[in-house]
Amino acid sequence: MIGPIDRLSGWLGKLCAGLMLLMLLLAIAVVVLRYGLDRGSIALQESVLYLHGCLFTLGAGFTLRQQGHVRVDIFYRRWSARRQAWVDLLGTVLLLLPFLGFVAWQSWRYVFNAWSRLEGSAEAGGLALVYLQKSLILALVLTLGLQALAELCRNLQRLREGAR
């Protein structure tokens, strides 16, 4: 179970790297259009925002896999591998998974309503894809939740193997 989830997170991490480059190029285009050519593009500006949302929501599982999320490391780094596994396991079970459940529960109707209306931008010339952007909330729950389960299994393995 761990391997396929780790591969999915790795693939999403690579996708996010490409999306970050695209977001950078679009942001440069927005600036050049606005300040160099005195023209604006709401669709380009919204594209940058959509990509920014993609990076955070689709990259969260990859970041968890890489141990890149913020933690108070002044104690953790000095602890044994076994104690670290316990902290990670309890953090996942008591904090991360309940948080993801809450986000899913709170956002389900929000995303459903956006899809039922095929919600688009409120701005003239904006993108008609707001419902897809809102769906990223549930994509975050899914991808981060899967990686959380993989980390849970990984930490259980460490504890079973008697990590020291």
Image (spheres, rainbow, N blue to C red):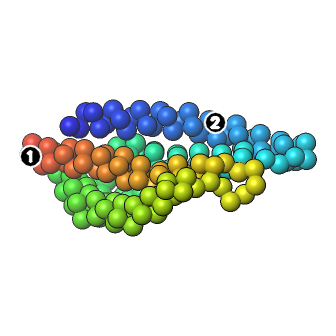
> Residue, x 72% and y 44% (percent of image)?
44
| The N terminus - image quarter | top left
Horizontal and vertical percent position of residue 64: 37, 48
Q: Is residue 80 visible?
A: no
The type of residue carrying mark 1 is Arg
**Cβ–Cβ under 8 Å for marks 2 and 1:** no
Element at label 1: helix
Instruction: Decide which of 160, 144 is in the foreground and name it.
Output: 144
Horizontal and vertical percent position of residue 114: 51, 58
Q: Is residue 118 visible?
A: yes
| Left-right relation of 105 to 156 | right
Instruction: Check residue 22 in the rendering and tell me which mark sits there, or answer none.
Output: 2
Instruction: Check residue 60 in the rendering and tell me which mark sits there, or answer none.
Output: none
The span from disc 2 to disc 1 (Cα, nearest Å) is 43 Å
Horizontal and vertical percent position of residue 103: 38, 63
Circle 2 or circle 1, nearest the eye: 2
Q: Which residue is mark 1?
A: 160
| Above or below, comparing residue 62 to residue 49 in the picture | above
